[in-house]
Amino acid sequence: MVELVPLEKKYLDIVTKWNYDSEINFYFSKRPPLSDEQQNLWLEKTLSDAAKKKYIIIHQLNQKPVGMVSLMKIELTSAKAEFGITIGEKKYWGTGVAMAASNMLLHYAFQILKLEEVYLTVFEANVRAIQFFSNLGFVKTGRTFTNENDASLIEMNLFNTHFLNSSHPH
Ligand SMILES: CC(C)(COP(=O)(O)OP(=O)(O)OC[C@H]1O[C@@H](n2cnc3c(N)ncnc32)[C@H](O)[C@@H]1OP(=O)(O)O)[C@@H](O)C(=O)NCCC(=O)NCCS
């Protein structure tokens, strides 16, 4: 259903378009970079960071980029990383592309990188994303945070053994 290709400069415009969609960035904890220069700097920094792996999700039917899925803060010593996903083309919400792309990256994280734990933080109000992450097998850890605007975020995590042994449809 989808292919994952590493983020590169040719995708910067489309990633920027997604980042500026208020329905998409509503739940981002960081504001997206503003100017072209800031966007280019963000890309350079992201691509040179060995602890980050960001992939563009390509829909196999039409070869269109529809979103981005990421592992961040990859720590091989503690075998952990942070997970993130955005389906920037909203007409693909609810079509299974987010699930397919997440399962591909989680298989990579657990089977190739041999991580033990993948975690994420999500706004408590982002009920769609929380349901989506639960469907993938993530569970709430009980840790909560508030950001500078006093909005609540929750942490969820998923362990290698749970993901690889679960009956979730991957
Ligand atoms: C989060 C995201 C990747 C999920 O992808 P998606 O294609 O929309 O997800 P799915 O449709 O497969 O799953 C969403 C689930 O939430 C449910 N849902 C949708 N709206 C809901 C709502 N308002 N309240 C409760 N559940 C809701 C759906 O029914 C579905 O669950 P089900 O399959 O058990 O019925 C996508 O919506 C997105 O990119 N959102 C914007 C960016 C974002 O929030 N990223 C996460 C930040 S941590």
Image (cartoon, rainbow, N blue to C red):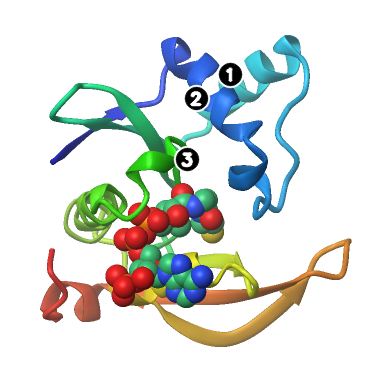
| Residue drawn 33% across the image and 43% down it | 92
Amino acid type indicated by mark 2: Leu
Residue 131 vertical position relative to residue 12 in the rendered view, above or below? below
Where residue 56 appears, x then y in whole percent? 35, 31
Tag 3 secondary structure: loop
Is residue 162 something one can see in this rendering? yes
Tag 2 secondary structure: helix
Instruction: Check if mark 1's residue and mark 2's residue have beta carbons within 8 Å.
Output: yes
User: Within the image, what quadrant is residue 27 found in?
Assistant: bottom right
Q: Label 1: few (<14), some or many (≥20) within 10 Å?
A: few
Horizontally, residue 54 falls left or right of residue 148, namely left
Q: Is mark 1 within 8 Å of ligand 1?
A: no
User: Within the image, what quadrant is residue 18 found in?
Assistant: top right
Where residue 127 appears, x then y in whole percent? 53, 72
Along the polypeptide, which appears first: circle 3 or circle 1?
1
Quadrant (top left, top right, bottom left, bottom right) of the N terminus: top left
Q: For the view shown, which residue lies furthest in the right direction?
A: 149
Horizontally, residue 41 falls left or right of residue 84, namely right
Q: Is mark 2 within 8 Å of ligand 1?
A: no
Residue that badge 3 annotates = 52
Residue 70 vertical position relative to residue 32 in the rendered view, above or below? below
Amino acid type indicated by mark 1: Glu
| Residue drawn 42% across the image and 60% down it | 77
Amino acid type indicated by mark 3: Lys
Q: CA distance from mark 3 to mark 1?
A: 12 Å
Q: CA distance from mark 3 to mark 2?
A: 8 Å
Residue that badge 1 annotates = 44
Residue 137 vertical position relative to residue 43 in the rendered view, above or below? below
Determine the quadrant in which ligand 1 lies. bottom left
Residue that badge 2 annotates = 47
User: Within the image, what quadrant is residue 36 found in?
Assistant: top right
